[in-house]
Image (cartoon, rainbow, N blue to C red):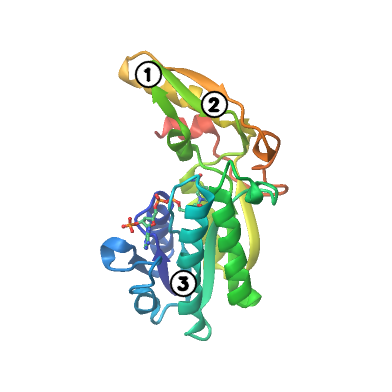
Amino acid sequence: MQITVYGATGTFGARLVDQLRERGHTVIAAHRGSGVDTYNGNGVAEAAEGSDVLVDCVNRMTMKGRQAVDFFSHSSRSIALAAAEQPGTSVACLSIAFRPEVGESKLLGYYQGKAVQERIYRRIVPEERLLIFRSAQWFELVDAMTISAGPLCFVPKVRVQALAAAEAARMMAEAIDVGETGTIEVAGPEISDFATIARRLNAHRAKATGTKSPQVIGIPLPGPASRDGLIPPSPRLSDVTLDDWLRTY
Ligand SMILES: NC(=O)c1ccc[n+]([C@@H]2O[C@H](COP(=O)([O-])OP(=O)(O)OC[C@H]3O[C@@H](n4cnc5c(N)ncnc54)[C@H](OP(=O)(O)O)[C@@H]3O)[C@@H](O)[C@H]2O)c1
């Protein structure tokens, strides 16, 4: 198949591109550096030309709900409309694991954007041509959730069933390869929380570099994320644990 990956240079997109090429697919790698901007629509339809599947892996990292909704609504609409111009073209949207109440949380505004993204695809793309692939949070996300202050690190104490981004990319490539549609959720083999993952990651780095590990302070978050708001109910599981991932880090 020919597959256009929007966000092809990102943490996930780069891994997905490798996985799809390994399976013999022709990949059009689209991102702003290649002249494609999903936010304002420039180059989106051109990058889609002749592709069987359009994959949305673009991202804007913000916890401000208004910014997240603005970015994901513009981007998903431009990709969905490019698919609609080519009868027979499917869409695969990379989303993230969250329960509906988190999608309305003001504290975690990013998830409002992801909720809108999923809604737009469901509205514009026929269901027999749409895959919503919802991955649990990745081990790689921990650094982005960390605020460092000298010897201290502050990390939200939020329960997650994290997995390696490479594992999520492998599972999404498999699903695209066999033409799966509908909603698929994937997660790691263990439920933990970001603060615990950060402690293990910092200890691993300190050991590797012979330095002192910063002290991680877990910050409890109020609201739905403090309960099981990010734990997918019945995901497909990766068997790569945090320890396995750290060994390859
Ligand atoms: N982090 C997690 O734990 C996690 C878990 C599950 C799902 N996800 C989802 O995974 C997706 C990708 O996240 P990521 O961490 O891989 O993102 P990332 O590393 O920030 O990469 C973002 C990608 O999008 C491209 N991009 C950004 N703005 C663009 C625009 N206006 N037009 C075209 N391309 C644009 C970037 O390339 P340029 O800058 O060159 O344009 C880059 O290739 C997100 O939707 C996120 O919700 C994340």
Name the amino acid type tagged 1.
Ala
Q: Estimate the x, y position of residue 126 in percent, counting from the top left.
A: 62, 78
Residue at image location 58% in from the left, 59% down from the top: 133
* Residue pointed to by mark 1: 206
Q: Which mark is residue 79?
A: 3
Secondary structure under tag 3 reads helix
User: Mark 2 or mark 1, which has the lower sequence index?
Assistant: 2
Q: Tell me, for residue 195, which label it has, or none.
A: 2
Q: Please name the amino acid that badge 3 sits on.
A: Ile
Q: In which quarter of the image is residue 21?
A: bottom left
- 110, above or below 162, in the image: below
Q: Nearer the viewer, mark 3 or mark 1?
A: 3
Tell me the crowding category of disc 3: few under 14, some 14 to 19, or many 20 or more residues within 10 angstroms, Cα based.
many
Instruction: Judge left or right: residue 70 versus residue 209.
Output: right
Residue at the spot 62% in from the left edge and 73% down from the top edge? 123
Task: Tell me what residue is drawn at x 70 percent, y 38 percent.
Answer: 228
